[in-house]
Image (spheres, coloured by chain):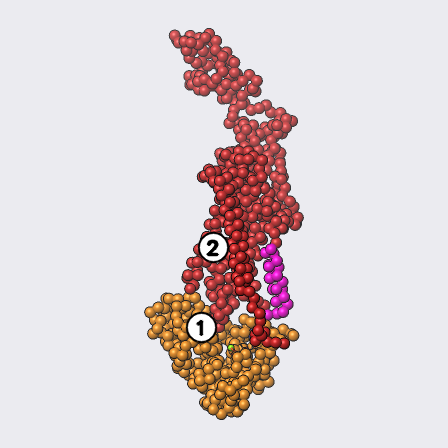
Amino acid sequence: MSTTPTVMNQSKRSPQSPVQAESTVTLDPPLMDAQTAIAIDSFNAYYGDFQALHDLHLDIPEQQVTAFIGPSGCGKSTLLKWCNRMNDIVPIAYATGTLKVGETNVLERGTDVVDLRRKVGMVFQKANPFPKSIFDNVAYGARLHYKISRPELFDLVELSLKKAALWDEVKDRLKQSALGLSGGQQQRLCIARAIATGPKILLMDEPCSALDPASTSRIEDLIFELRRQFTIVIVTHNMQQAARCSDRTAFFYEGKIIEEGATEDVFTRPKQRQTEDYVTGKFG
Amino acid sequence: MTDPLNQQLEHRSDGQRKMFSSSFSVICLLVSSLAIVVLATLLFSIFVTGGTWLNLEFLTASHRENNPEESGIGQAIVGSLVICSICGLVALPIGVGTAIFLEEFQPRRRILRMFHGLIQLNINNLAGVPSIVYGILGLTAFVYMFGAFHSIRINGQPDYEIGATYSYQVKTLGGQYVKFPARAKLQPTIEIQDSRTVTDSSGKRFKLNVFSPIDEESTLAKTRSKSVIRGTQAQLINREGADLYEAATIDGRSFTFPAKPTYSQFAKILEPITVTGPDGKSFELNVLSKSEAIPTDELVKARSVFADSPDPNKRSSASIFRENSFFHMHLPFSKSVLSAGLTLALVILPIVIIASQEAIRGVPQTLREAAFGMGATRWQVVRGAVLPSATPGIMTGAILAMSRAIGEAAPLLAVMGGVLGTTNHLSSLMDRTPVLPVTIFKWAGDENQGFEHLAAAAIIVLLAFLLMMNSVAILIRHRYEKKLA
Ligand SMILES: Nc1ncnc2c1ncn2[C@@H]1O[C@H](COP(=O)(O)OP(=O)(O)OP(=O)(O)O)[C@@H](O)[C@H]1O
Ligand SMILES: [Mg+2]
């Protein structure tokens, strides 16, 4: 097994501008004028000798919510993590093909991952606030990337917390430890923290799987509110959630995208047997 | 094959199993209480043997040969603390740095990963190496530096050295030591041929008189006029109605001093007396024995040396004299505090690395992901997310490692020898010093029975240090656990 790290074969795609509306892959886009935020082409991902994703083609449109669904282990998180190169932490992980965020192929060796992650924020399955104050948690990213004055920082923190619908609950305890928040609050704090660096894209990996129904619905509302400001990609095992809050859905199975399209179509008029079985819960 | 879950299996006797279980716990209890009893006995006997010897004097005095009553561990405590500080200052940054490198900077290339694994394997193995082996390693690596440099010359200057000032020192005819700065290439001794500027013991600078060997010892008229030879006879005279004694000084000037009624006709002058000179001024008379040479002026003698002399005792050759500043260092490090500290650092380095790795591994991966996901660089992740959470664990590990270092005797015996006491106090990194464990070792084996008590007392002090460090470690862990919760 060769250990070619993140080798890139330049895409066979014509030097097509990502600004151009995408109409080849998606047969029935809900918003015809949507531009492509993430363009995935001939994408393969490996963990050592194991190939986790096989020859993916997918375009994720801007300012919409795209849901990844599929059974456990089918590679949803793997694709999500490659979108902001979080797989760099895993020494044995590498990928081939193209994965363009805006104009740049992020799989390229020279990619500035720091800048990429500023533009492509991530929210994880388990809320992972730093053991610091609520304020410092939200300010963390801004402090990493920007020279920012104290009052500006306060404004930014307030704005981010308001966007994440958490401000009213924590405005009197900003100095307290973030670990004292409830699970749902912590997850919204993580969303606020991701928003605070000013990303264009938000990746969410099962953000509600550890939460109770009440917190889940708050986060879903939040996703609904945020979807015209950010491009959101959400991984979920909850079919209702995917149906409720996403514009487009991609169904993964054993490392391949079986079906991709407008959420309504995928759920009500699936073209593939596997998709139908999965969304109707007949999977087995 | 039959399904073992659905099979009717014969039950084992319940009573027998319970018997076994309970007798096993009794055995465990016995064994562990035996260990505690042994420890308690040990502590008790140590306190009985050494407890009464423990006092302030013992804690501050230094070792006296054959004199347990006045011996103490002052130098040993200072030595142990200094060596442990050096050890900590060296081992902590390197150890924590290595742990961070191994845990947080795992390479992607296969060859580098193998190199990484090799380092890890080595560290794990090194943790089990007996400390005396490190002692021998320290001896070759630090004390002799693989013989790569000239060994330290007695009285001479090592090849690579900082922090030392050299001067020549010479004894004057008056018995005073004077010195003058050494320049250029140093020789162990030089012949003084011409006059030069020197400094005396009080720090005053002056020009040194240099006589040729054929010169007579200098005499000064002023001194001679105020001296008599011991046994000089003074004669009683009567001048203007008063009884006086009169005698002559060496250079022939006469003087008088009052005679008391009890004085006999003749008096031998055996002690210095106050006399009056021909000019009427009174002064203290120098009295020399007959066998002594003609008196010379002390001021002159103190400032004079012979250029050369057939008499070797009077030959004025200056020997080299070194003054060390606290940062005095040379290559190789030779048997010194620095070698000892570095060797101990080697001993505890694997422990520090492994403890720090554990602490770093204990930091939840989600924290790293959070920081990376926000666009933190590797270093920002380490600095901002990993280290703050790992610090209590690292500190505890470090303190426990230091408490191992403070109790090590074997490697120190190898790199410093069994020093019990030094005449000079520890003033530079190149000095040698006694330390607690070595002192205990030497005292316990001393022929003089009294030192056994001292060894016990020193053990109590060492145990107190260990206890202190361990409690600090526990305190830190406790404190941070609360803070993070
Ligand atoms: N760090 C890793 N090292 C090796 N293999 C991995 C690693 N992470 C994931 N995999 C493998 O890659 C495949 C895809 O994993 P991934 O986490 O992307 O699945 P997923 O679709 O997110 O599953 P789930 O819904 O359970 O989260 C799985 O077979 C998994 O075993
Ligand atoms: Mg997953």
Residue at (61, 74) in percent of width and height: A48
Please name whichever residue, B73 or B323, is drawn nearer the observer in this view of the structure.
Answer: B73
* Ligand 1 visible in quadrant: bottom right
- Up-down relation of residue B404 to residue B58 (above or below): below
In this rendering, position of residue A164 left or right of residue B396: left
Q: Could you tell me how far apart the alpha carbons at marks 2 and 1 are, in whole angstroms? A: 31 Å
Q: Which residues are magenta?
A: B108-128
Do badges 2 and 1 share one subunit?
no
- Place of residue B156 in the rendered image (x, y in percent of width and height, measured from the top left): 62, 41
Image point 52% across, 81% down: which residue? A71
Q: Which chain is indicated by disc 1?
A: A
**Which residue was labeled with disc 2?**
B473
Name the element at disc 2: helix
User: In the image, is residue B164 part of the stretch drawn in magenta?
Assistant: no
**Looking at the figure, which quarter contains the C terminus of chain B?**
bottom left
Q: Amino acid at mark 2?
A: Ala
Display colour for chain A:
orange
Residue furthest to the right in view is: B147
Chain to which the residue tagged by mark 2 belongs: B
Q: Residues within 10 Å of mark 2 (few under 14, many from 20)?
A: many
Kindly identify the residue that appears in the image at 54 percent across and 52 percent down: B31
> Which residue was labeled with disc 1?
A127
For mark 1, give the secondary structure. Answer: loop
Q: Which amino acid, by three-letter code, is at mark 1? A: Ala
Residue A236: give x, y in percent of width and height: 47, 81
How many numbered badges does the structure rendering display? 2
Residue B262 vs residue A259: left or right? left
Q: Chain B colour?
A: red
B409 above or below B224? below
